[in-house]
Image: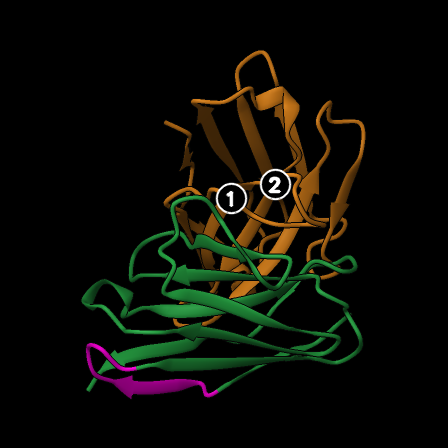
Chain colours: A orange, B green
Amino acid sequence: EVQLVESGGGLVQRGGSLRLSCAASGFTFSSYWMHWVRQAPGKGLVWVSRINRDGTSTSYADSVKGRFTISRDNAKDTLYLQMNSLRAEDTAVYYCARDPGITGIAFDPWGQGTLVTVSS
Amino acid sequence: DIQMTQSPSSLSASVGDRVTITCRASQNIYNYVNWYQQKPGRGPKFLIYAATTLQRGVPSRFTGSGSGAGFTLTISSLQPEDFATYYCQQSYSAPPTFGQGTKVEIK
């Protein structure tokens, strides 16, 4: 079964840092682009970042550029999101998602999410 | 960035009803639209890609249509497990963007 499990969320003060992890199983992790998508409480979905198969190419939403870093360890089948200089508006559930590679950019499957709360 | 606008934001329907959700893009995106279903406390589920193609395992009561800038998700006969929030997403250009969601509630 294809599965993504996020971890590392929690409560952090404004200006602090946090590293999220996403453990993948049930598929060949190194064959897929991966993404982070977030959802503020009661709000919609917002794409955050993506990384290509070998980690040599990354892209970010303008709102997190320069503060967040996406990376991956294909030997450990794990995706990461290093979040620095956190702001109150970064409070959200963070989902990792695989890009199935069947149509432009898509997300399938998604993890269950990990909640990041930035206190001001 | 391409803006995706869904309507309605919410709707109430009964089991067995036909439900239609509309998504409009701020520019021509051809058929580069995906649809997702999200239930409370869970990550979204991938339903439809390229505007009309059902992902494996998705029931045939779900139908996607449209092209250009206007798209529709239709549920032909609403089932109890379909009460959820639905999102469209454009995959035409980066960054990928989502509609604001349509919550389908029990009448």
Q: Position of residue A14 (x, y in %)?
A: 53, 57
Q: Is residue B70 left or right of residue A76?
A: right
Q: CA distance from mark 1 to mark 2?
A: 6 Å
The quadrant the N terminus of chain A occupies is top left
Residue stretch rendered in magenta on the structure: B8-17
Residue B23 on the magenta span: no
Q: Nearer the viewer, residue B85 or B65?
A: B65
Q: Amino acid at mark 1?
A: Asp
Which residue type carries mark 2?
A: Asp
The numbered mark at residue A108 is 1
For residue B14: magenta? Answer: yes
* Corner quadrant of residue A117: bottom left
Q: Secondary structure at mark 2?
A: loop
Query: Residue A77 vs residue A62: left or right?
Result: left
Q: Taking A78 as reference, is B93 above or below it?
A: below
Please state if B51 lies on the left or on the right of B40 as rendered.
right
Q: Which residue is mark 2?
A: A99
Q: How many C-alpha atoms fall within 10 Å of the one at disc 2: few (<14), some, or many (≥20)? A: many
Q: Nearer the viewer, residue A17 or A113?
A: A113
Q: Work out whether mark 1 precedes mark 2 in sequence or the reverse, and give the earlier one.
A: 2
Up/down of A48 relative to A5, above or below:
below
Q: Quadrant of residue B9?
A: bottom left
Residue located at (34% from left, 87% from top): B11
Q: Chain of mark 1?
A: A
Residue at the spot 49% in from the left edge and 22% down from the top edge: A27
Q: Position of residue B30 (x, y in %)?
A: 77, 68
Label 1 with label 2: CB-CB less than 8 Å: yes
